[in-house]
Amino acid sequence: MSSQSTGLRHWRQRFSALFQDHEIFIRTHGHVRFLRISAVWQKRVALIAGLVLFAWAGVTLAVFVNQILTSGERAEVAAKQAAAAAGEARIAKYRDRVAEIAADLDERQGQLEEWKKDYFGDEPLPADAKTGATAGETADKPLETSAIDPRLPPEAQALARLEARQEAFSAHLLAAVKARAAKAEVAVAQLGLDPAGLVRNAAAGRGGPFIPFRGRTGQASALGKSFAALEGALFRMEVLERTLVAIPSGQPAHVLMLSSSYGYRSDPFTGAGAMHSGLDFPGPLGTPILAAAPGRVTFVGQRSGYGNVVEVDHGQGILTRYAHLSGFTTQVGAQVAAGQQIAKMGSTGRSTGSHLHFEVRLNGVAVNPRRFLEAKADVLEVKADARQRVGALASAAPAGRGAR
């Protein structure tokens, strides 16, 4: 105890030694004053300053501790705010994407409906060979949704079901197009033409500037692989059916006899072997000459050896030539129908008597017209169906869609 008392006394003495009475002399204008600062007053000021310093240190320590304790909460709040902002951005992006998909589906639906109306009219598509269902039943039948992820939002599931319906309708339309193109292909082949070559030649004559397809959202997009396959099948069917319609299968003159066939013959003037590029139909002078197929008159006049000539372009590279005429009943640029009179039979040019020289040219090369004029009934039936469809499409062109 004595040692502790001694230690306390020692420190008390040292603390008291810090505060001594002080006298300060102040001289002003010859007057001297004494300012006394006592040790007790000094101790009081020091005590007050110590208390203030201690209080400041306590407040500072409390603020520091509070910052340490709340930094985790602030970080958590900041993380939640960042997550919320990211979530809102994802939601906005998702909504934009849903809107784009909906617009694309709307565009695809419009294209499907246009193709259906252009190529099949208002009649329903043929029943599916596998399921026996028509296109309308396929579109109206509720689809199984087991393949659609149930975790998707409702609007996404609705879009997925709509897309599935469109794919089903597109597949059904593609099957119908392929079936009709196959019939046209068989008919064209029976007429001695090469269907693949016709489609290839038609595809070689396309071009134009590249303008990306843009949907309703204004963004470049594509219609998808199934729609590309459908577009290709439609192009093939279009070429083959238009070729059938262009084929001159109508009789160019109502006469019963044929005086000269296509191919090798003895020249009627010299007797030498010669190539005859058409068919000769003898008949009375002035017999009406008829267009063998619908088309546009591209030449009316004289050609060496042929005399008076009328030429009609039927499209798809097919042209008919009518020669040795005595007169014309049409003019260049006129659109003529099958069976419409375009001239009168005669004996002009290199001719031995009144007759019609009838030629058919494919891409500028003469071919045997007999195979077209003697087409079988099944071929003519397919041609009649194609003519009805092509004619309806042509009549709809001025309404704003344009001929394909």
Image (tube, rainbow, N blue to C red):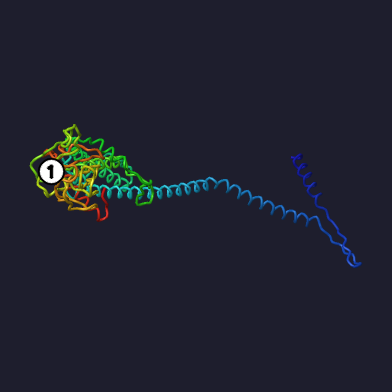
Give above or below for 388 relative to 258. Answer: below
Residue reaching furthest to the front: 270
Q: What amino acid is found at the position of numbered circle 1 in the picture?
A: Gly
Residue 299: x and y in percent read 24, 48
Which sits in the foreground, 66 or 281? 281
Q: Residue at x 77, y 42 (%)?
A: 7
Instruction: Specify whether residue 110 is in view.
Output: yes
Residues 301 and 224: in front is: 301
| Place of residue 281 in the rendered image (x, y in percent of width and height, measured from the top left) | 12, 42
Q: Callout 1: few (<14), some (14-19), or many (20+) C-alpha neighbours within 10 Å?
A: some
The residue that appears at 49% across and 48% down in the rendered structure is 77
Q: Position of residue 162 (x, y in %)?
A: 27, 46
Q: Quadrant of the N terminus?
A: top right
- Dot 1 lies on which element? loop
User: Residue 9: percent from the left, percent from the top?
Assistant: 78, 45
Please give the count of numbered marks on the rendered protein. Answer: 1
Query: Is residue 124 in view?
Result: no
Which of the 4 image quadrants contains residue 143?
top left
Closer to the camera in the image, 133 or 157: 133
Residue at far right of view: 30
Q: Quadrant of residue 175?
A: top left
For mark 1, what is the residue?
Answer: 353
368, 372: nearer the viewer: 368
Query: Which residue is rendered at x = 15% and y = 39% of the image?
Result: 279
Residue lying at the far left of the rendered structure: 256
